[in-house]
Image (spheres, grey):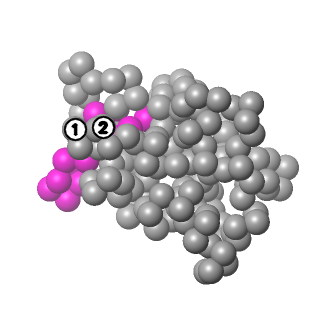
Amino acid sequence: MPIGDRVVAMELSSRMELISFDVRGEAFCIDIMAVREIRGWTQATPLPQAPDDVRGVINLRGSVLPILDLGARLGLGQTEPTSRNAILVVAVHGTFIGLLVDGVDEILSVGASDIHPAPELCRGEGRSLVSGLLPGEGRMIKVLSLEVVVPETRARAA
């Protein structure tokens, strides 16, 4: 269920859990129900003529897992991975994809009223990637819509 639909459905369940992480100094979070595993950085095998945000693929217990550089996908620049980076293995559009992030922070339990809509000033694709904003302690955490960050056509191609 897309996070936007979950926010509406939260009126009944009242709380949901999000996992927060950093990308290029910015705080983001996604629905924890989409996360299947958190791994340390593993060198990816590049694919010829892949888009700039596709780092390549890794072997995950005998399966080929495509790795998406979330910094590049969000327009924040490509990541030069080190042992401090992490891969969030997420399920989106019926497949698994690894998201390269700078680091994983914490699990947040939030209510519907805690998530604010993205301002109208953010137009175009950037606004659609961010489904909401979560004010935190001295920072604003952007709630990502995985279904938009990883389009179905890209997920199927992976």
**Which range is magenta?**
55-69
Viewer-nearest residue: 43 or 117: 117
Residue beneath label 2, please? Answer: 154
Could you tell me if residue 141 is visible in this image?
A: no
Residue 127 at x, y = what percent? Answer: 62, 36
Q: Which residue appears at 56% of the width and 57% of the height?
A: 4
Q: Is 62 in the magenta?
A: yes
Question: In the image as oriented, which residue stretches furthest toward the bottom?
Answer: 13
Numbered disc 2: secondary structure = helix
Where residue 5 appears, x then y in whole percent?
A: 53, 62
Comparing 129 with 104, the one in front is 129
Q: What is the tally of numbered marks visible in this picture?
A: 2
Residue sitting at x 83%, y 56%? 137
Residue 10 visible in the snapshot: yes
Identify residue type, mark 1: Ala
**What amino acid does circle 2 point to?**
Arg
Binning the other alpha carbons within 10 Å of mark 1 as few (below 14), some (14 to 19) or many (20 upward) gives few
Q: Is residue 80 magenta?
A: no
Residue for badge 1: 157
Q: Are marks 1 and 2 in contact (CB under 8 Å)?
A: yes
4 left or right, relative to 116: left
